[in-house]
Image (cartoon, rainbow, N blue to C red):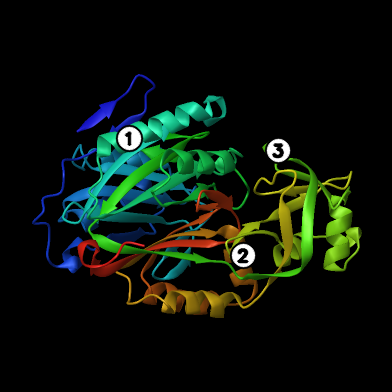
């Protein structure tokens, strides 16, 4: 049943999945549909036709900014069951089994046979208190009442120009410490414009949608970046995290110290240098990448994720973009039914600049990738950059395998 609270947020939570749910995991396969129609009426009709024979618990749309997400959502909402969650966002590019796409719509449907879903929209993020975020997320989880025998994940879609992804990721982790949460920062093309966030037929900026998705399938987490850390530790001695500005590294102007460590002059700093040498926070042996957007006249660095004073950073060096990506996916125990994917637009630009688009097209097809290019990614309670975050839905049931 669909309901609306007094803040205007909407959530959906269907009844419990019956214990006799499909014994054949293939029947609970997520469905990916791609439309390249330039008209939202045509695109929605193509998506409706492809999903018409499936009773769906949730549909997620990833739409190019050239189409009206609000119009797409309104048209699809009228044809879906009222208790089917319809969420989505505009993108900086799309991902499908044919590789990186542009000016398209990707729809991912989750059949009710193997999934259950609930969602809420947080509007006016910049005016909400963190305590409100936490309260709403906990209330959604309590109402959802997860089944311990199934795999539960959280999906986050958040306006990529809100600059609130860092604190929102931490807040969700605090609200639901046992639930792995993954997601992406939305955008509108490559020009750094705010991306629309959709829940049902309503699309907003300065907003986020948080979904709970329960799966009877095993869900493997795939986190990939193409950097290794080099050099010694760098200590952040002055920063303004609310503005994502790094003022000092090792008590020196950040741009001066960064350029010294990279081995170039400040005048040689460029988007290419920043892309090849991001900043890295290492926690428990895992990289959390902080991309650099630009430098300021007074020697500060403007980042795409926040860092706090006292944070220890390392300098990153780009490595094998294609080989590392393929090896990480080949490490999966079997071929995924679908890999729901959030991939930084900076990675896409690096792939295209290196002439690797065809190679990635083959990888995307082999591992059934569907998703969108982001302005940033979320996993492990953190907001990161230049990272591929994937959820691989495997052809094994969660009840028959340990959930990791």
Q: Position of residue 403 (x, y in %)?
A: 32, 61
Secondary structure beneath label 2: helix
Q: Above or below — where is 272 with respect to 137? A: below
From the image, tell me which residue sits under label 1: 140
Whichever of callouts 2 and 3 sits on the residue coming sooner in the sequence is: 3
Q: Residue at x 55, y 77 (%)?
A: 324
From the image, tell me which residue sits under label 2: 349
Q: Is residue 289 left or right of 212 when viewed as pictured?
A: right
Whichever of callouts 1 and 3 sits on the residue coming sooner in the sequence is: 1
Q: Above or below — where is 310 with respect to 362? A: above
Q: Position of residue 347 (x, y in %)?
A: 59, 64
Q: Decide: few, some or many residues near mark 2? Use Cα within 10 Å; few <14, some 14-19, many ≥20.
A: some
Tell whether label 3 touches label 2 (CB within 8 Å). Answer: no
Q: In the displayed image of the protein, which residue is found farthest to the left?
A: 20
Q: Above or below — where is 264 with respect to 266? A: below
> Disc 1 vs disc 2: which is toward the camera?
1
Q: Which mark is residue 324?
A: none
Cα gap from disc 1 to disc 2, whole angstroms: 37 Å
Whichever of callouts 1 and 2 sits on the residue coming sooner in the sequence is: 1
From the image, tell me which residue sits under label 3: 243
Instruction: Kindly indicate the quadrant of the structure image that contains residue 80.
Output: top left
* Residue 230 in view of the camera: yes
């Amino acid at each position: 049943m669909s309901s609306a609270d007094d803040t205007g947020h909407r959530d959906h939570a269907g009844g419990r999945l019956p214990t006799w749910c499909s014994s054949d995991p293939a029947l609970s396969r997520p469905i990916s549909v791609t439309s390249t129609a330039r008209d939202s009426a045509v695109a929605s009709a193509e998506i409706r036709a492809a999903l018409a024979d499936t009773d769906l618990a949730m549909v997620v749309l990833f739409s190019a900014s050239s189409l009206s997400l609000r119009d797409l959502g309104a048209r699809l909402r009228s044809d879906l069951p009222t208790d089917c969650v319809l969420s989505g966002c505009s993108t900086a590019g799309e991902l499908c089994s044919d590789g990186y796409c542009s000016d398209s719509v990707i729809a991912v449907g989750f059949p009710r046979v193997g999934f259950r879903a609930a969602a809420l929209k947080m509007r006016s993020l910049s005016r909400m208190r963190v305590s409100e975020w936490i309260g709403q997320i906990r209330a959604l989880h309590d109402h959802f009442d997860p089944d311990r025998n199934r795999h539960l994940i959280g999906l986050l879609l958040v306006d990529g120009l809100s600059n609130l992804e860092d604190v929102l990721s931490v807040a969700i982790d605090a609200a639901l410490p046992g639930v792995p949460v993954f997601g992406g920062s939305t955008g509108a093309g490559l020009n750094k414009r705010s991306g629309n966030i959709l829940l049902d037929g309503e699309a907003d900026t300065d907003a986020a949608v948080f979904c709970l998705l329960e799966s009877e399938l095993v869900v493997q987490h795939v986190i990939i970046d193409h950097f290794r850390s080099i050099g010694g530790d760098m200590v952040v001695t002055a920063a303004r995290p609310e503005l994502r500005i790094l003022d000092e590294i090792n008590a020196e102007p950040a741009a001066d110290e960064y350029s010294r460590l990279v081995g170039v002059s400040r005048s040689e700093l460029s988007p290419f240098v920043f892309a090849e040498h991001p900043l890295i926070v290492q926690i428990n042996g895992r990289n959390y990448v902080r991309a650099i957007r630009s430098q300021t006249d007074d020697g500060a660095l403007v980042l795409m994720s926040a860092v706090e004073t006292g944070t220890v950073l390392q300098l990153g060096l780009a490595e094998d973009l294609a080989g590392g990506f393929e090896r990480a996916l080949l490490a999966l125990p079997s071929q995924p039914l679908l890999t729901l994917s959030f991939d930084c637009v900076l990675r896409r630009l690096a792939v295209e600049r290196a002439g690797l688009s065809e190679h990635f097209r083959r990888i995307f097809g082999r591992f059934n990738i569907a998703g969108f290019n982001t302005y940033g990614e979320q996993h492990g309670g953190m907001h990161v950059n230049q990272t591929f975050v994937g959820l691989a839905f495997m052809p094994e049931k969660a009840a028959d395998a340990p959930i990791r």
